[in-house]
Image (cartoon, grey):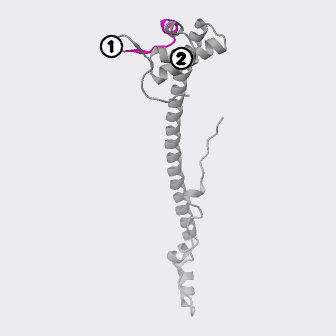
């Protein structure tokens, strides 16, 4: 409708909405709108004041709500806005906590995966041939002694941390 910066006089605002200036004064007296005042005590309507007045006029003229009802609607809207802001703050905090927990779980998974690799390597080391068997194998032409290094060459973790996905139960 209108998106100018600055202030409007009561006469201009009354023309915008095709209402009498006295109607606007009554809405102000009831506390439904609160335009600023100049040093000469002239009402100065900002864009926000005009939007508030537009809502009051819509409720009274279009929907037939009385002034007490309009006051209740406006109070409830403020309360809803406050509650929404509080809920958004709670959600933001919970999101941060979930991110921290996700990071802790990710680090724990990495540590556990590394422990599993270590255990696997230890188990592979336990299957090495005895020294006597190694000497026999080494004595055969073209054969090398089996050492831990050779056994571990093919032992690498089969998983990467990116293979894990942390999900939360949304219930």
x 50%, y 47%: residue: 103
x 54%, y 74%: residue: 153
Query: Crowding at label 2, few (<14), some or many (≥20) Cα neighbours within 10 Å?
Result: few
The answer to whether residue 170 is above or below residue 145 is above
> Which residue is at the far bottom?
141
Frontmost residue, 85 versus 99: 85
SS class of the residue under badge 2? helix
Q: Which x, y percent locates residue 167? A: 61, 45
Residue 5 visible in image: yes
Range of magenta residues: 26-37
The answer to whether residue 137 is above or below residue 94 is below
Residue 76 visible in image: no
Q: Which x, y percent locates residue 69? A: 61, 9
The residue to which callout 1 is attached is: 39
SS class of the residue under badge 1? loop
x 47%, y 29%: residue: 4
Q: Which x, y percent locates residue 166? A: 59, 48
The residue to which callout 2 is attached is: 15
Q: Which x, y percent locates residue 58? A: 61, 17
Q: Residue 141's quadrant in the figure? A: bottom right
> In which quadrant of the rendered image does the C terminus lie?
top right
Labels 1 & 2 near each other (Cβ < 8 A): no
């Amino acid at each position: 409708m209108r998106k100018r910066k600055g202030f409007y006089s009561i006469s201009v605002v009354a023309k915008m909405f095709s209402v009498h200036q006295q109607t606007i004064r009554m809405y102000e007296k009831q506390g439904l709108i609160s335009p600023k005042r100049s040093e000469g005590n002239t009402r100065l309507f900002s864009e926000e004041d005009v939007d508030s007045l537009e809502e009051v006029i819509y409720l009274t003229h279009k929907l037939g709500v009385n002034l007490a009802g309009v006051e209740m609607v406006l109070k409830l809207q403020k309360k809803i806005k406050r509650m929404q802001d509080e809920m958004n703050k709670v959600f933001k905090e919970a999101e941060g906590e979930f991110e921290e927990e996700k990071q802790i779980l990710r680090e724990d998974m990495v540590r556990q995966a590394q422990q599993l690799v270590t255990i696997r390597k230890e188990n592979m080391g336990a299957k090495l041939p005895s020294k006597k068997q190694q000497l026999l194998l080494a004595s055969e032409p073209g054969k090398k002694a089996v050492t831990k290094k050779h056994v571990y060459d093919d032992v690498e973790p089969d998983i990467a941390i990116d293979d894990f996905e942390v999900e939360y139960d949304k219930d």
